[in-house]
Amino acid sequence: FCLSITAWELFTGVFPPLNNNEWIEYFFEYKKIPEYKNINYGMTLSEFKIIFYWEYAHRLLARFVGLFTLIPLVIFSFKYSKTKYYSNKYYFIFLLICLQGLVGWYMVSSGLINNNDVSHFRLSLHLFLALFILSLIIILKLIVIQIIIGAFLSGLDGGLIYNTWPGMNGNFFPDDINLKDNLNFQIFNNVSIIQFLHRFNAYFLLFFVIILNYYFFKKSNEIKFIILFDIAILIQIILGVITLVSGVEIKYASLHQLGSIFVLSSYLLLFYKNSS
């Protein structure tokens, strides 16, 4: 996760810098944080613009999501408040989206003073809220847990070790930990353990996917959605392995993160089509 915009800009920042002076001002503020001093020292303004636009696009999309939630909410509240179609649950969705923005800044702020990167705890919380909003009521435990562990792994740069598969340098368990490492809170900061959990949960999830396939192919005539889910799982596994053995090349890592949303969305579609 690369930082670039060092202020929350709740009501500003809708437009990117429009002249060279504004760019220099943003770049000057970026130079104050540890990520620049310890990782990107000497970065040019042109290079800064690349990471800036990634974060700017993320924030702009968040604003659109908020507006697309707020505007219909106001309209429905006035038009349908006295009909059977009205429900207060939509206010809950909007509050969750507002909370997601607050947690997003809470995450970013963790990388502005003492740390080179944002806190992986806060990064995972930000991702969890996004997935919870997407799922809302249905919390798909194994899929969500797998994505969250993946966020921990990303925040800790955990893909840079044990770049072999299926074993971890030839072993099922990582060889640089002991039993004591698994019995304290520091487990969530141990890169080797987090990578192992990410692998193990993937195998566990795959086991239940096989059972799910057995049920659908034996009991249901509507199999196109389970096939879509299977394709999402297969692509995600392949991307995960490629990301690992490539030493976490950014193009594969980004596709792997996008693939997690494809997996979750295809399962939600499968659930919806078979519960309606």
Image: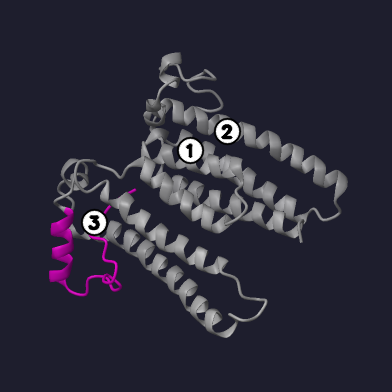
Dividing the picture into quarters, in which one does residue 192 lie?
top left
Task: Give left or right: position of 168 versus 219.
Answer: left
Above or below, 20 against 239 in this view is below
Could you tell me residue 13's position as x and y percent? 27, 70
Q: Which residue is mark 2?
A: 201
Above or below, 90 against 233 in this view is below
Q: Amino acid at mark 1?
A: Ile
- Residue extent of the magenta highlight: 1-30
Q: Which residue is mark 3?
A: 47
Could you tell me residue 122's position as x and y percent? 37, 45
Crowdedness near tag 3: few (<14), some (14–19) or many (≥20) residues, C-alpha within 10 Å: few
Disc 3, disc 2: CB below 8 Å? no
Which is more toward the observer, 25 or 100?
100
Which is more toward the observer, 166 or 115?
115
- The mark that comes first in sequence, 3 or 1, is 3
Q: Which mark is residue 149?
A: 1
Q: Amino acid at mark 3?
A: Glu
